[in-house]
Image (cartoon, grey):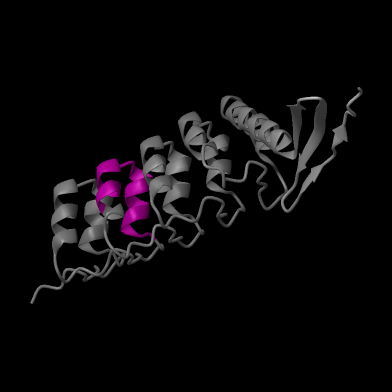
C-alpha cells in the first residue's frame, strides 16, 4: 500500500515536508488526516522538520494545521539547533511567533542555537519589532540573554546597527518588570485602628512577610 511517510532519496524529505515548505495548505491538511501518517516530527537531511520549514517560509496557515497535530514536537531543533521559533523570529513572521508561543507544550522560549542566540536575540538583531513584542509579553522570556560571545541584546542592536527600535521595546519591558519587582518587594501598610494607629512596613520576599507595628497609646 501507499507509504505516506516515505522520504525521497536525495534530501530525505517526505510529502509533508514538501507541502509545508511550499505552503500547500490543502495538501498538508489531507496528509495530516491520513490515518497512517507518523512523520510530523521527521527531519530531512539538514535536520528540518515540516514545522520548521513552514515557519521559515512564513506559511502561517500550514503552521496552524501542524500545531493541531497530536504528538507534534514544537520544540524540535535542527542541525544548527534552530527551532521553529528561532526561524519565525529570524525572518520576522510575527503571526507564527504568536501561534508558537500559544502552544501548550512550547518550552524553547530561551533555547539557544549553535551561536548561542535565543529567539529574542535573533528578533532584535534583525529588528523584527513585532516579533520582539510577542516575545517580551511572555514572562518566562529572558530579556538579559547573551550569545556565546557574551554579547547582550543592547550590544547586538548597536553592533548590527538596525536593531535600535527592537531594543527599545525590550528596554521598556525591562523597566516594567523592574518596577513590578520593586512593588512586590516593598508595600506600605497603614491602618487606622480607632484610638490607636497601626503603621507598618510590609516587606515581601519569596518566603516571608516582615511587619513592623507601632501602636499609638490611648490618652485619657
Q: Residue at x 21, y 70 (%)?
A: 5
Viewer-side residue, 158 vs 75 = 75
Residue 189: percent from the left, percent from the top?
75, 31
Q: Residue at x 53, y 31 (%)?
A: 127
Give above or below for 116 relative to 131.
below
Q: Residue at x 74, y 28 (%)?
A: 191
Residue 119: percent from the left, percent from the top?
52, 46
Give above or below for 167 relative to 33.
above
Viewer-side residue, 142 vs 87 = 142
Quadrant where the image shows the N terminus: bottom left
Residue 157: percent from the left, percent from the top?
63, 32
- The kind of secondary structure the magenta stretch mainly shows is helix
Q: Inspect the magenta stretch and tell me whether residue 182 lies in it.
A: no
Q: How many marks?
A: 0
Residue 79: percent from the left, percent from the top?
48, 62
Taking 81 as reference, is 105 left or right?
left
Say which quarter of the image contains residue 176.
top right
Amino acid at each position: 500500500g501507499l507509504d505516506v511517510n516515505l522520504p525521497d532519496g536525495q534530501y530525505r524529505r517526505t510529502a509533508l515536508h514538501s507541502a509545508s515548505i511550499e505552503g500547500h495548505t490543502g495538501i498538508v491538511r489531507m496528509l495530516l488526516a491520513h490515518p497512517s501518517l507518523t512523520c510530523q516530527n521527521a527531519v530531512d537531511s539538514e535536520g528540518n522538520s515540516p514545522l520548521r520549514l513552514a515557519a521559515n517560509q512564513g506559511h502561517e496557515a500550514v503552521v496552524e494545521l501542524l500545531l493541531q497535530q497530536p504528538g507534534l514536537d514544537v520544540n524540535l531543533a535542527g542541525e544548527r539547533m534552530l527551532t521553529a521559533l528561532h526561524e519565525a523570529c529570524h525572518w520576522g513572521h510575527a503571526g507564527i511567533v504568536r501561534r508558537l508561543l500559544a502552544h501548550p507544550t512550547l518550552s524553547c522560549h530561551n533555547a539557544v542555537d549553535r551561536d548561542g542566540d535565543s529567539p529574542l536575540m535573533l528578533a532584535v538583531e534583525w529588528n523584527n519589532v513585532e516579533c520582539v513584542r510577542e516575545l517580551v509579553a511572555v514572562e518566562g522570556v529572558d530579556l538579559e540573554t547573551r550569545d556565546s560571545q557574551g554579547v547582550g541584546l543592547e550590544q547586538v542592536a548597536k553592533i548590527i546597527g538596525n536593531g535600535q527600535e527592537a531594543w527599545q521595546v525590550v528596554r521598556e519591558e525591562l523597566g516594567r518588570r523592574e518596577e513590578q519587582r520593586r512593588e512586590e518587594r516593598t508595600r506600605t501598610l497603614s491602618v487606622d485602628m480607632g484610638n490607636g494607629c497601626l503603621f507598618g512596613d510590609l516587606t515581601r520576599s519569596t518566603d516571608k512577610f516582615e511587619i513592623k507595628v507601632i501602636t499609638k497609646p490611648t490618652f485619657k
